[in-house]
Amino acid sequence: MRKEDAYILAITGGVLGVAALLTTRRPSANTRRDQVTASWAALEYGYWEQFTPPPRIYRNAKRIAQAIYEPLYQALPGQMIINSWYRSPRVNTSVGGSKNSDHLEANAIDIRYHVNGQMRNDILSQEVIRLGLPFKQMILENGTYNRPEWVHLSYVPGENYKQILRKTGDDYTPLTEWNVLLLS
């Protein structure tokens, strides 16, 4: 930990100190460090380790923010909301995450996209394809076929093989880029 970070923690103490620290450096121009570790499950169950991950988590968060989030943010006129980014092992288990989830290393983000007051995750997923963004997985999760509740995007250098899946409950169905482009 840097000296100035320790100072912020010492002055403000506890979770407030962590919150102050998290907002001092950003993963990218339009994301904040507190978004990386935000978790209602961690707050509910008292999994405080969620809020103080090791430094590699922020390095990974910066990579995915710059490779995926920022290009989408620049291309889309609506509001993008990050549901989930980093998950500590206990948080991941409590929310039913996969044992090998890319969220465990902050290599995945779940995003909801709103435009004109409507959730339009179909547009978000189509923009990922149109921009040719590098991703390991894009999972259109729950909701209806044309309107998923959120879009899971993972990014791992050297592993971005662009797998596209549709998740409904516990079932995963492979999709092609054409399937995504035809959503509406």
Image: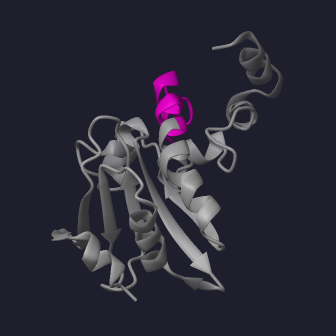
Judge left or right: residue 24 versus residue 78.
right
**Snapshot quadrant of residue 27:** top right
Which quarter of the rendering shows the C terminus? bottom left
- Against 72, is 124 above or below? below
- Against 105, is 2 above or below? above
Q: Nearer the viewer, residue 82 or 95?
A: 82
Residue 10 x/y as whole percent:
77, 18
Residue drawn at x 64%, y 42% as measured from the top left:
28
Residue 55 x/y as whole percent:
52, 23
Which residue occupies the extreme right position in the image? 11
Magenta-drawn segment: 46-62
Which residue occupies the extreme top position in the image? 3
Tell me how many marks there are. 0
Judge left or right: residue 101 versus residue 9.
left
Q: Nearer the viewer, residue 34 or 126?
A: 126
Residue 108 x/y as whole percent:
40, 48
- Against 155, is 119 above or below? below
Residue drawn at x 47%, y 43% as measured from the top left:
64
- Give the main secondary structure, helix, strand or loop, of the magenta stretch: helix
Judge left or right: residue 128 versus residue 21.
left
